[in-house]
Amino acid sequence: MRLFTAIDLPADMLEKLGAFLARVRPLAKLRWTELENLHITTKFIGEWPEARLADMKTALHGVKQTEPIRISVRGVGWFPDLRRPHVFWAGVEGGEPLAHLAQATEKAVAALGVPVETRSYSPHLTLARVKYVVPFEDLIKSAGDPSFGTFQVSCFFLYLSANGKYSKLAEFPLNS
């Protein structure tokens, strides 16, 4: 089983993102993320044995949050940069509370033997992946600096990733 933890986006934000993607999709031949697959990953777990799924859920139930998480989604950019683009993303701002959730999740699953991420946490929404280098000028001009809104996080989810589809396996409420 290929697993990750993530925060879902509210419906009104998905509508704004959908309108933005409908406007920019025709401007570049990229591998665009389906709207229903947009999420904010807090921890990529990777392959996990199905026989130990209950252990994973128990560990994640122990992740608590003492302060509210308020997330804003705004701006777009490229990883690693525009000269060597691999990912077209929308920015996610959640400050220290979101970073704390990612660290707490990392710690909880590390206790089960999941490798610790060596890169610093960089929350974002993957809007598209670059398969082949194509002209991006029209996309860059049209994208601008969009703002998709702000929302309060009340829970996170454990997801299964299989064949490009994501399925929720469990929900974990956050105590504020």
Image (cartoon, rainbow, N blue to C red):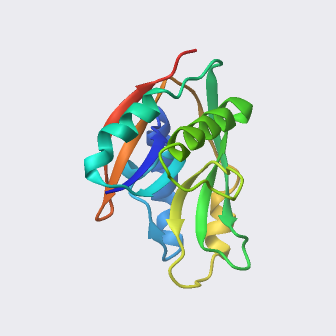
Q: Would residue 167 appear left or right of 120 to someone viewing this image?
A: left
Task: Work out whether residue 166 or residue 1 is closer to the camera in this orientation and state it.
Answer: 1
Whether 86 is drawn above or below 164: the answer is below
Q: Quadrant of the C terminus?
A: top right
Q: Quadrant of the N terminus?
A: bottom left
Q: Nearer the viewer, residue 148 or 41?
A: 41
36 lies left or right of 97: left
Residue at 58% over, 43% down? 106
The image shows residue 26 at horizontal and vertical percentages of 47, 69
Position above or below: 59 against 32:
above
In the image, residue 174 sits, relative to residue 2, either above or below, namely above
Residue 168 makes an appearance in the image: no
Q: Can you give x and y, in whole percent of width and height, for residue 86 in the image?
A: 60, 73
Residue at image point 28% right, 65% down:
163
Q: Residue at x 60, y 53 (%)?
A: 116
User: Residue 74 at what x, y percent from top left?
Assistant: 66, 44
Image side of residue 37 versus residue 27, left or right: left
Q: Quadrant of residue 103?
A: top right
* Displayed quadrant of residue 8: top left
The answer to whether residue 81 is visible is yes
Looking at the image, which residue sits at the far left? Answer: 51
